[in-house]
Image (tube, helix red, strand yellow):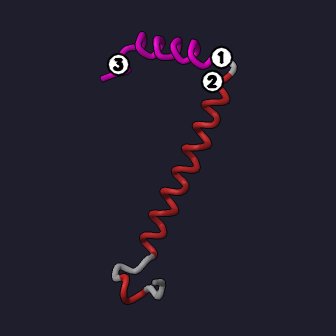
Amino acid sequence: MFLREPSHILLLLVVLVVLFGAKRLPDSARSLGKSMRIFKGEMKEMKEESKSEPKDPEKGSDEK
């Protein structure tokens, strides 16, 4: 697997700091976290919607 050893994680962190710079990493991580929260919320909403919809589209839905 990819990140088995601590040296792999350290190397990845060094590459990230070199590519993005130490100042931009916290902002990037914060932005990624917000995006993940939005994505999870949308997925949860879609699951709740699919549970509340009737199984037979012809019997319970007047939208066409």
Give yes or no for contact between labels 3 and 2 (Cβ–Cβ under 8 Å): no
Q: Earlier in the sequence, mark 3 or mark 2?
A: 3
Main SS class of the magenta portion in the image: helix
The residue that mark 3 highlights is 4
**Residue at (44% x, 85% y) in the render:** 61
Q: Which residues are magenta?
A: 1-21
Q: Is residue 63 above or below residue 44?
A: below
Q: Is residue 18 above or below residue 45?
A: above
Residue 12 colored magenta?
yes
Q: Position of residue 42 (x, y in %)?
A: 53, 57
**Residue at (52% x, 51% y) in the render:** 40
Disc 3 vs disc 2: which is toward the camera? Answer: 2
Residue type at mark 1 is Ala
Quadrant position of the C terminus in the picture: bottom left
Q: Position of residue 8 (x, y in %)?
A: 41, 14
Dividing the picture into quarters, in which one does residue 3 lie?
Answer: top left
